[in-house]
Image (tube, rainbow, N blue to C red):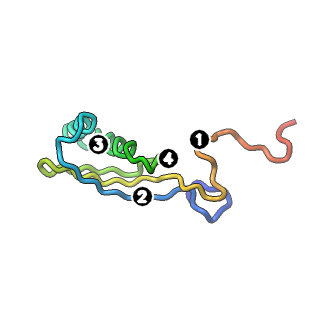
Amino acid sequence: MAGCFDSSDDCTTQVDRLVTMRTPTDPAMDFRLEACRTYYPVACEDVCDLLLRREDQFTQQTLAHCEVAFFGDTVAVKMSFETFSGGNNCPIEGDDAPVFVGGGVK
C-alpha cells in the first residue's frame, strides 16, 4: 500500500521508461545533456525532470530513478517515476488541509 489510508487500492503506480534520442535535440534539452555529460551524475536528474514535464499524460509524477548514458550522438535515458493513480481512499493530490470528522474542534 503506497500512501493510502485503510485501503487495498494503491494510490501510486510506478512507471519505467527508456527513452533514446539523438543529439542535438532542442536548446533546453541540449543544455541539460551537456551539463549531465560534464557533471555526471550530479546534473543528470535535470534531463529526466525535463522529459517528465514534457509527458502530457503524466501530470502528477515523482521521479524515483534516473540514469543517462551517452553513445556517440545517441543518448539513452532510463527512468522510473511514480504517478498518482487515485485509489478509493487516497488523499487528493495537493490537498494538505486536515479533514475533521464528527464536528471538529469546539
Residue that carries the numbered disc 4 in the rendered image: 60
Q: In which quadrant is the C terminus drawn? A: top right
Look at label 1 and name its amino acid: Gly
Along the line of sight, the residue nearer the viewer: 2 or 47: 47
Cα distance between the residues tagged 1 and 3: 27 Å
Q: Is residue 12 above or below residue 53?
A: below
Cα distance between the residues tagged 3 and 2: 19 Å
**Residue drawn at point x = 63 percent, y = 49 percent:** 91
**Residue drawn at point x = 29 percent, y = 42 percent:** 44
Cα distance between the residues tagged 3 and 4: 21 Å
Q: How many marks?
A: 4
Earlier-in-chain disc, 1 versus 4: 4
Along the line of sight, the residue nearer the viewer: 88 or 63: 88
> x and y percent of residue 69 in the render?
21, 51
> Callout 3: helix, strand or loop?
loop
Report which quarter residue 3 is drawn in.
bottom right
Residue that carries the numbered disc 2 in the rendered image: 15
Cα distance between the residues tagged 4 and 2: 12 Å
Q: Kindly check if marks 3 and 4 are in contact, taking CB atoms under 8 A apart as contact.
A: no
**Residue drawn at point x = 56 percent, y = 57 percent:** 2
Label of residue 44 in the image: 3
> x and y percent of residue 99 in the render?
74, 44
**Residue found farthest to the right:** 106
> x and y percent of residue 72 in the render?
11, 49
**Tag in front: 1 or 3:** 1
Cα distance between the residues tagged 1 and 4: 10 Å
The residue carrying pointer 3 sits among few (fewer than 14), some (14 to 19) or many (20 or more) residues within 10 Å by Cα, namely: many
Residue that carries the numbered disc 1 in the rendered image: 94
**Tag in front: 3 or 4:** 4
**Residue found farthest to the left:** 72
Earlier-in-chain disc, 1 versus 2: 2
Look at label 3 and name its amino acid: Cys
